[in-house]
Image: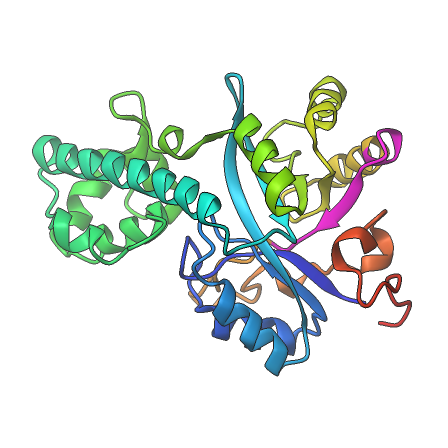
Amino acid sequence: MKIDLQLHSSYSDGYLTPTELVKFIAKNGVKVASLTDHNTVRGQEEFKHACRKHKIKYIVGLELYVKLGTKKLNMLWFNFNASDPELHQILRATQLRRRAKVRKHLELLVEKYKLKIDVNKVLDKYNHYVSINHIIDDIWDVPKNKPIIKRLLENKYPREGEIIKGLFYNKLFGSIMHQSYINIDRIIKLRKKIGGQLILNHPGKNHDLKLDLLEKLKKIGLDGIEVLTPHHSIGSTMYAQFLAKKLNLIMTGGSDFHRFEGDGFLIQSSMDYFSIDCRQLRGIDKIIAISGKECPTDN
């Protein structure tokens, strides 16, 4: 049975609405899915209703930026109470910190690089998570900004990732990300109240496939690791599988879908070459259990 436990919508840094996203994954044969927007649960109700319409098993989800001491991590959270007021308070605080940091950053870009940005107008478009890729789209859409950005990056054809790195993650301004992290102890404490499973997200991408780190995380409450993801090499996938078995951790998988590539490319998203069968994931029933049954063996 095909599943996808990492998807992003327009409520964070994705480009499809939750409803559009469900239509897309339904066409791709996904039977169990979770919307894991960054630090927001705003799209969950719409996603749940769309999943019900398309007969897809809905799993409530969230992707969090957390910190363990000075270590920064991405964490997936499934099957929690998304209506809990304390959760909303924590998420809103991260959103406001990020918004303040992005505002300051945009003002510096205007002052130092003379980019044409209506800071208030841009930020007013994003009431929850402020997505840097969407902000970049807004900046790039202003014709006068394109030659400035090309000159700054010394690149006539900069891609989105190159613009983000050049304008938002440099030594001059610091990292936007640091404003969005939550102490993991706070999340573990809240999880005891509202339930769910905590999963280390695409650890191979962030160089977090380390036994000592996973042992430490498991000791404080980690339930599993994401094994199947387009961000992992075959080597990372195999090692993640080994660590999950060694430490008795749940294995999950997700496409990390955000958008279609466009520009006429034959491969438009990871879904064109990547799929996840629940039978490949150890312990996945603890997350996707349907009426207490094990992962079905049909495709």
Tell me the magenta residue range: 244-255
Q: Is residue 151 above or below residue 145?
A: above
Quick one: 59 or 155, which is closer to the camera? Answer: 59
The C terminus sits in image quarter: bottom right
Residue drawn at 73 percent across, 17 percent down: 212
Counting from the top left corner in percent of width and height, residue 238 is at 82, 37
Whether residue 59 is in magenta: the answer is no
Counting from the top left corner in percent of width and height, residue 16 is at 44, 67
Counting from the top left corner in percent of width and height, residue 13 is at 42, 53
Does the rendering let one see residue 72? no
For residue 219, which quarter of the picture?
Answer: top right
Judge from the rendering whether residue 150 lies leftward or rightward of residue 253; answer left or right.
Answer: left
Counting from the top left corner in percent of width and height, residue 235 is at 77, 35
Residue drawn at 52 percent across, 26 percent down: 67
The total of numbered circles placed on residues is 0
Q: Is residue 61 above or below residue 203?
A: below
Query: Residue furthest toward the bottom?
Result: 53
The N terminus sits in image quarter: bottom right
Whether residue 246 is in magenta: the answer is yes
For residue 91, which quarter of the picture?
Answer: top left
For residue 75, which quarter of the picture?
Answer: top right
Query: Residue furthest toward the right?
Result: 297
Residue drawn at 42 percent across, 40 percent down: 90
Quick one: 70 or 92, which is closer to the camera? Answer: 92
Judge from the rendering whether residue 79 lies leftward or rightward of residue 133; answer left or right.
Answer: right
Residue drawn at 21 percent across, 42 percent down: 149
Does the rendering let one see residue 86? yes
Which of the colour schemes (rainbow, by chain, secondary structure, one colour) is used? rainbow
